[in-house]
Amino acid sequence: MDDPVFKGFFVLVGYIIISIPFVEWPGSVIRTNLDPFVKASVFLFFVALFVDTERRLKVFLFIFVGCQVFRVLEPLYLNVTSGYWGSSTYLSSKEFANRLAGAPADVINPNELGFVIATAVPFLHYLLWPLGWKSKALYLLLMPLLLYALILTMSRGGFIALLVVAFFVFKESKKKFRLIVVGILAAILAFSVMTPVQKERYLSLIDRDAEGGASAEGRIRGMVNEFKLGMTRPIFGHGLGTTPEAKVHKLGSRQASHNLYAEVLIELGVVGFLIFMAFLSKIIKKLFFVRSSFSKLNMDSLDFYARLNKALITLFWMYAVYSINYWGLSQYYWYLFAGLVIAFSNLALKNVSGKSYDSSSVESCHYDSKFRLANKVRNRNY
């Protein structure tokens, strides 16, 4: 519990509780909105406290990443075999275009499915590709399926999140030219399998005249309005989970926030916003500290903990960017990630200290043997 990430979270929880009497709708916080926050934040404790051995860490990663991949492959399989889509979007031509969402029993829309894909990719890349040919074969099998599913979601936020992941993979790679070639080929192949509507949807990120450009522009205006809404009660905010309520009363539409940072400002005010950002900064500082500990020991780049550290750093920045287009104060993903970082760093630093001890022991044995040899030579000469 002395971990800086835990302390940052406890400060956030303490502020939420203390500020309840001063928010605009304290009754909504107590009656309705504390429960989802508790259910989301329990993932931090679950992962940080129970994942306490390397075996448990690997089992957790296998289950978590495996479940995310299955959440993508199931609707993709249904789409290929039975024409399942799960969602649609309205076009300016007064028609609807199909979009792939989660499976019928799942709860995620197309944008959230894109988020799941972008979450799984860093783990697959860093934990599978550096291993043997079987892992490489599995990687090469899964990646095209995930990318094709992303195309079918038409999720611009998921596409941007994947670009963030690709940037960090490129930044860490020693074979940059090869990655550029692979990226160009993948882009050409992806564009060739897209329908005209899908092409227009992704081009709307840079071309406001393309189909979907108006909705992208509207999303930006909506984010600006949310930040303005947050500044109507800048100190304590409207209350945990009250973003839809605040938007109904002051903007005329009941919607979840399209921006995590605006959501935090609306619900917790400037003070809560700074506390939440400090909580996130403690997470990335811990990952950077582990990375610097690895570099001092010159650990093998293929070491499990070193590879997982790269995956988590990449995932952090992907989450940070994706949160511009996604809510999350009472969603699970930041808290599960924080718990994973705590568990990982504890095990990784034990691994580092063990290697440091082993190397110092080897060095001391080396000097001890040299000392004994010198004594034998001295005694013989004497």
Image (spheres, rainbow, N blue to C red):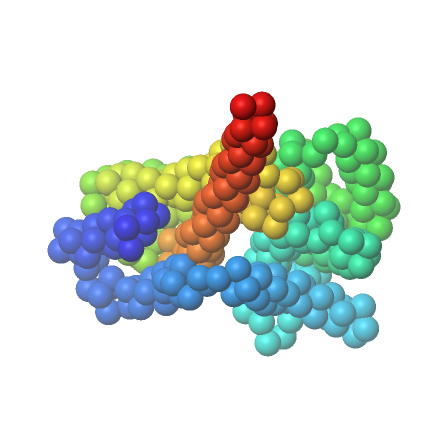
Name the residue at 47% across, 53% down.
Answer: 347
State left or right for residue 3 relative to residue 173. Answer: left
State left or right for residue 334 relative to residue 93. Answer: left
- Camera sees residue 316: no
* Position above or below: 51 against 182: below
> In front here: 361 or 174?
361
* Position above or below: 379 against 53: above
Can you give x and y, in whole percent of width and height, for residue 365 in the image? 53, 39
State left or right for residue 103 relative to residue 139. Answer: left
Q: In which quadrant will I find the C terminus? A: top right
* Position above or below: 222 against 376: below
Can you give x and y, in whole percent of width and height, for residue 266 in the image? 31, 46
Q: In which quadrant will I find the N terminus? A: bottom left
Q: For residue 4, which quarter of the picture?
A: top left
> In front here: 360 or 236?
360
Q: For residue 108, which quarter of the picture?
A: bottom right
Give the farthest residue toward the front: 382
Name the residue at 33% across, 40% down.
Answer: 278
- Camera sees residue 69: yes
Can you give x and y, in whole percent of width and height, for residue 24 in the image? 20, 53
Name the residue at 64% across, 40% down.
Answer: 300
Name the residue at 28% across, 64% down.
Answer: 34
